[in-house]
Amino acid sequence: MFISELGEQWHGARIDPTITHLDSASAGRSSNAVIEAITDHLWRESGRGSYVALDDVYNELLDGRNGLAALLGTTGDRIVYRDSARAALRSLLSAWNLPIATTVWVAKNEFGPNLIEFERRGFAVRTLPDADVYGHVDVDALENMLQFEQPEFIHVCQIGSASGVVQPVKRIVDVAHDAGVPVVVDMAQAIGHVPTVTGADFSYGTSRKWLTGPRGVGFVAVHEKSLRPVALADLEVGTDSGYIAGRLGLGRAVAEITTVGAAKVHRELAKVGQATRERMNGIGSWEVVEPIDEPSALVTLAPPPGWQAGDVAAAAAHLRSTGVLVTAAHIQRAPLAMEHSVLRLSPHLDVTREQLDRVAGELRTMGY
Ligand SMILES: *Cc1c(COP(=O)(O)O)cnc(C)c1O
C-alpha cells in the first residue's frame, strides 16, 4: 500500500525497480518519459547532427528552462546550466567579484564539500546560531548579529545532505536583505522536494535527486533583483556543447512535477517523510535525528549507542544485501553538525508501507 495518494501514479510512470529504492537524496529514479526524452534526443543527434538537432528542440529547451525557473520563482533567462550543483557553486564563486578577505556565514547543516570550496578560496567561515537541537537557524539571533556585522554573503543549504532539517530560507533572506547581505542557497536536496521560491539572490542545485531528472545536469539561478548582480554571461560557458539531452530530460521531469502540482508533491513528500520517521523511530535503538514532523522526506537515523562509522557503513551494506538501497552518511557531509555517522533513508512518492515494514524488520535485527 502506497503511503502517498500520488504513489500509484509515480510508481506507474517508472519501471519496477529490482530493489527497495530509498535513496532519492543520492539520485531519484527517472520516469520512463524522462528516459525517452533523453534517448530520443541522442538518436536525433546521431541522425541529424548535434547542432541541427539542437535547433530542432530549441523551444522545448526553453520550455524546460522556464519550468525549472518557475520552481525557483524566477524566469528561464535567469538560469544557467552546469554539470552539477558543485560546478554551479564553483562558477558562481568564480564569476562573483568577491574581496580577498571574504567572510561567509553558513548554517550548521552546511554540506562538507561546500566548506572545502570556501576554504580553498580562503574565505572565513562562521556558523550561524541555531534555534534548537536540530540545527534550524535562529533567525532572530541572525537579525541581531547583522546589526553589528555583515558578511559578504550568507550561504545556506535549504536541506543538507545528512539531515532532513528544512532551513527557514525565506525568513533568512528577509533579514539578510534588510541588512544588505546577499544570500546563496544550495537547493541540491530541496528542489522538487520542498517549496523553493525564496527570494534568494542565487540558488543552485542538481537534476538527479528529488526532481528525478538525469545525472550530469546542475543549474544556478541568478535572481533578477540580486543585491550583487553577476553577469550571466560570466557563468555561461559552452552552452552549445552542453548536455542538451540531459536538459531535455530535466525539463520533462520538472513538467511531470508541475503537472501534478509542485505544492502537492511537496506536501506528499512531507507525509512520506513523517510516516517513515514514525515507522523507524526507536526500532532496535535507532533514533530519528530530525523532528518526526519535519516537512521533508529525507530521514536520518542515529545508530544505537557506541556504534562507529564502520558499523553504520556495515548496516547500509547489510540492507543492500537484503535489497534495500539507503546511504550511510558520515560526518564529512555535515562536519559542523554531525558527531557520528547516520543511516539516511530518502524514499520518494512511490514508497509502500510494506517496504518500510521490511526495513524496520531489518533494523530491529541490527540494533539491540
Ligand atoms: C548532493 C549535494 C550537493 C552536490 O551536488 P552535485 O550535483 O553532486 O554536485 C550539494 N549540496 C548538497 C546539500 C547535496 O546534497
Image (cartoon, helix red, strand yellow):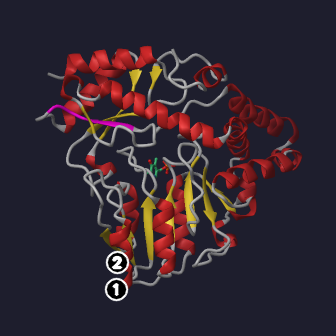
Mark number displayed over residue 148: 1
Q: Nearer the viewer, mark 1 or mark 2?
A: 2
- Which x, y percent locates residue 234? 65, 72
- Which x, y percent locates residue 225? 65, 74
Corner quadrant of residue 316: top left
Q: Eyeballing the image, is 97 above or below 323?
A: below
* Separation of residues labelled 1 and 2 (CA atoms): 7 Å
The answer to whether the residues at label 1 and label 2 have Cβ atoms under 8 Å apart is yes
- 201 vs 342, left or right, is right
Give the residue number, with chain letter if any, for mark 2. 144
Foreground pick, 102 / 242: 102
- Which x, y percent locates residue 40? 78, 32
Query: In the rendered image, is residue 221 in sight?
Result: yes
Q: Which residue shows up at 34% across the image and 28% down it? A: 278
Q: Eyeballing the image, is 347 above or below 61?
A: above
Quarter occupied by the C terminus: top left
Q: Which residue shows up at 32% across the image and 59% down it? A: 108
Q: Which segment is the magenta one?
A: 299-304
Identified by mark 2, the residue type is Asn
